[in-house]
Image (cartoon, rainbow, N blue to C red):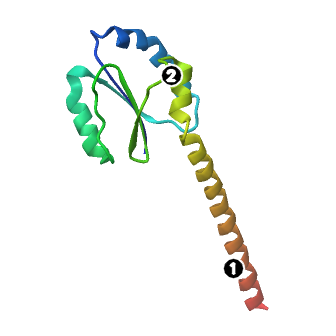
């Protein structure tokens, strides 16, 4: 599970200033092979946050104590963004601990494929030996 959540208010000047950088962040995400599911929750839609917390059964629920609140959820664990609100910083933060995990996942998938091929080759050799 890989989620990106932005909680904002239309009247908040920080949220208004974040809009162009958020758009750039979303563009950056679209170029990646591993993308989070993105949720954009406006203050009047806080029921969506409750639904999100319930749906994904998070280890600790996402909360908003101010606007904007930016949260990534990876493996059920929410992490709040505390850095500069520019697309480069947010993109770097978003993929910070996720990249190492995705590399491990890719390696294990390759290992599994290799293992399956090896097992299949052994079965084929065994079947040939039985025919003889």
User: Residue 110 versus residue 6: which sits nearer the camera?
Assistant: 6
Q: Is residue 35 visible?
A: yes
The percent position of residue 34, horizontal first and vertical second, equals 54, 39
Mark 2, residue position: 25
User: Residue 105 versus residue 114: which sits nearer the camera?
Assistant: 105
Where residue 112 sits, quadrant-wise, is bottom right
The percent position of residue 111, horizontal first and vertical second, equals 66, 61
Q: Secondary structure at mark 1?
A: helix
- Crowding around mark 1 (Cα neighbors within 10 Å: few <14, some 14 to 19, many 20+) is few
Which residue occupies 22% across, 36% down?
50
Q: Which numbered disc flags the more N-terminal residue, 2 or 1?
A: 2
Q: CA distance from mark 2 to mark 1?
A: 49 Å
Q: Is residue 30 visible?
A: no
Mark 1, residue position: 123
Residue 67 shown left or right of residue 92 in the figure: left
The percent position of residue 17, horizontal first and vertical second, equals 41, 9
Residue 90 shown left or right of residue 12 in the figure: right
């Amino acid at each position: 599970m890989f989620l990106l959540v932005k909680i904002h208010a239309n009247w908040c000047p920080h949220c208004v200033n974040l809009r162009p950088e958020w758009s750039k962040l979303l563009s950056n995400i679209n170029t990646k092979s591993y993308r989070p599911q993105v949720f954009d929750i406006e203050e009047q839609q806080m029921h969506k946050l409750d639904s999100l917390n319930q749906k994904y059964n998070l280890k600790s629920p996402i909360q908003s104590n101010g606007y904007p609140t930016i949260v990534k959820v990876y493996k059920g664990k929410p992490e709040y963004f505390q850095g500069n609100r520019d697309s480069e910083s947010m993109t770097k933060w978003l993929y910070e601990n996720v990249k190492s995990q995705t590399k491990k996942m890719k390696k294990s998938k390759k290992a599994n494929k290799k293992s399956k091929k090896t097992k299949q080759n052994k079965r084929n050799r065994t079947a040939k030996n039985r025919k003889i």
